[in-house]
Amino acid sequence: MSRRTNARISKAAALLAACALGLSLAACDRADPVQAEIDRVSTGLDAISTSGGNPLPSVEQRRRVYEWSINRLTGRSSPRNAVESDIADPERELKAPYAGRQATNVADPAPTNPPAVDSKNAGQAAAANLLLARGHAGLAEIAAQEASRLEAVALGKVPAVRVALDQWLSLNAAADALALYDPAPEIARIETQIAERQRMADEQRAAKDRQLAVVRSIEKQADDLNARARTLREQEAALRASAAGQSEVRRLEILTEATRVRRDADALEKQAADHVAQAALEKPRADEMQARIDEYTMQAQLLGQERENVRKRGQDRAAAAQAARDEARSAAARLNTLVADLDAARKEADGPAEAAVRGYLQAVGAARKAVQNGPRESQAIAAVSLGNYQHLVGEAHRTQAFGRAAVADILSAVAEARPPLPQRAEYAAKAAEFARLAAESLRESRSAYGEAQSSYSRGNAQSLADSMRHLAGDQAAPAPADDPAPADDPAAASAPSPPAAAMVATAGSAEQGVRAAVDRLITASRAIDTAAIKSMIHLDNAEARAVLDTLIDVSEGPAKLNAAAQATYGKSLKELIEQSSVPSVRSSPLLGQLLQQSDQLSMLPGDLDSVTAADAVIQMQGDDRAMVTMPGSDDDVSEPSTIDFVKHAGEWKIDADSLLAEMGGVQGLAMLGQMIGPIKAMSGAFATVNAKLAAGEYADADRMLTDLNKELMTAMMRSGGLGGPGGPGGG
């Protein structure tokens, strides 16, 4: 099951909003235990959702945090919890009496009573239920990932079944031929067949040799890239060693050069890893070619033996035919074993798949409460979240439908084999059952998509609702037959027609145009070219466009400061904050938000800083729409991001209409527009510090960070807060 992350036009602008909102809410709700519980859980969930420069938390760690968040919000948690308290309260370890102590020595506070999800404050209850939905969806995602892995294992067994089926068919065909031919004309025909099998084997052998040459070439390129990377690593080490004893200026120059060399080595190693992955993808094709070579060779050997038998004595024909049928029976036995393995492997995937569905349904239930019982002004946004979880329910069912349909396809082919296999009736029944289950899963997915459509419409996310309408009416899989055919009726013994093939999407010729647009977007983003980025965005709503353009403009400040920090100190702002020797820097609420949202310091709509347009996986959705999936960052390869593109006035652009729907429509963007004042002020703080850094006014990184913290606080105070909870007139 693929995981689709929300597209983001300006990650830096989102960071500024998060910083401002976090500061104001902290000031407002510090004395409210329910709000503190909500903040605690939100912080814990954010800690495993945003990995930044750190590795993605392990499955077990994420599972613990999701379970912890569910228990906290529902009041089932004990005061002492297995989840480390630095997740629940990131600043606690810096405060007396906990400073210097291990996180596991600090107990969580007791959960609120009544639980946060049952708060009498409608807004808090809605927020808690949305967090509860995140927890359930997180557990469901873990199960979905395991189901996806097991689906892949099961589908990996299908080729072996096909090979065994081909052997059964070819061996029986050979046996039939041996039983029928007359010695005089048959020799010529057999020789023709032998030559044909040899030609086919030779073609496959040549193709295999070419394929292995391709694999060896790719592996050699990977080895060469790794060798070059090792040389650069040695060069980097030598440069760093030579920095000792140098003047401060010279040492900075040497370390800057060493950093550049390290990045070059990183790039080479990434290229080498890509080549290794490519070689791994290419190798199985050679194995498939070898299987065909073996099959054709075996057929040629059988035919050659029969030719000699015909030449010697006609009476040997019956014995040769019997030998072929014996081989066919062995192939049938192997096929039966392989089908049993495939059946077991596919059913093994059902457990986690059904757990994923249950988890997503629990998320749906929690989100529905947020919609039904939350404040009117937040119901539209909550409805979009509800639609997202219903969408995930549909995706879980649809993924299961794909796997079941693929098994139904191959079992149907086995059941339809001529001559019939000994277990034909059993295969037909299994094929019918898997086809029935596939159709059932598809119906469930359509139902979930229909519910998502309704929720998205309620949340004013019309483009998402439209996409759900298409999925809810998808006729990809036909309904299975009501009953499997009886074993004694060959004409009716076949399983339902395959539902899987029609469910596969294909890319059109416009893919190259989309890829070129992705390349332009990455180039503009890395250059922090806000004008170019805005020109690549399509958004019909003029009011929303004005807010979006402002967000892109103000995102320039943090993005440029982060780039300047990398150039000056060889480290990102996140690394500098983490390694600062100044306590006020490490404990700052605003700079703490920078740590939690460190991956937001990019102009790119996703973690695309270390990838190129060639890495994009493009799915065309008609002639004028496409969904682009990019791999995650080097540090977080499991987190891909997706961007919707639309063709407008002959040019491919980011579809901000769908993004607007994900943000809660015009209503959601209007709420974000209320933050423009503080966001602009804080962006100006980044720009001010960047100018000072360029002018050389800071003796070291700590002084720069101290000044940044001061400028951000000053900007917040001058802007007057957000005007909501915690702002003027709030909490």
Image: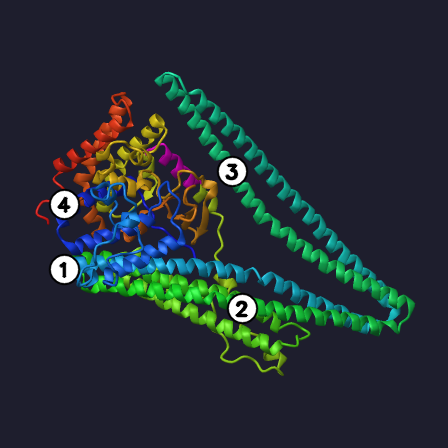
Q: Amino acid at mark 1?
A: Asn
Residue 90: which quarter of the image? top left
Q: Which quadrant does the N terminus fall into?
A: bottom left
For label 3, the residue is 271
* Earlier-in-chain disc, 1 versus 3: 1
Q: Position of residue 214 (x, y in %)?
A: 63, 43
Residue 229 seen from this side: yes
Which label sits on residue 27?
4
Q: Dot 1 corresponds to which residue?
A: 121
Within 10 angstroms of label 4, few (less than 14), some, or many (20 or more) residues? some
Which of pointers 4 and 1 indicates the residue nearer the eye? Answer: 4
What amino acid is found at the position of numbered circle 4 in the picture?
Answer: Ala
| Rendering coords of residue 100 (x, y %) | 27, 41
CA separation in Å, label 3 and label 4: 48 Å
Mark 2: amino acid: Ala
Q: Earlier in the sequence, mark 3 or mark 4?
A: 4
Category of crowding for the residue at label 3, using alpha-carbon neighbours closer than 10 angstroms: few (below 14), some (14–19), many (at least 20): some
Identity of the residue furthest to the left in this view: 729
Point out the stretch of residues depicted in magenta: 516-529
Instruction: Determine which residue is flagged by label 2.
Output: 344
- Secondary structure found at label 4: helix
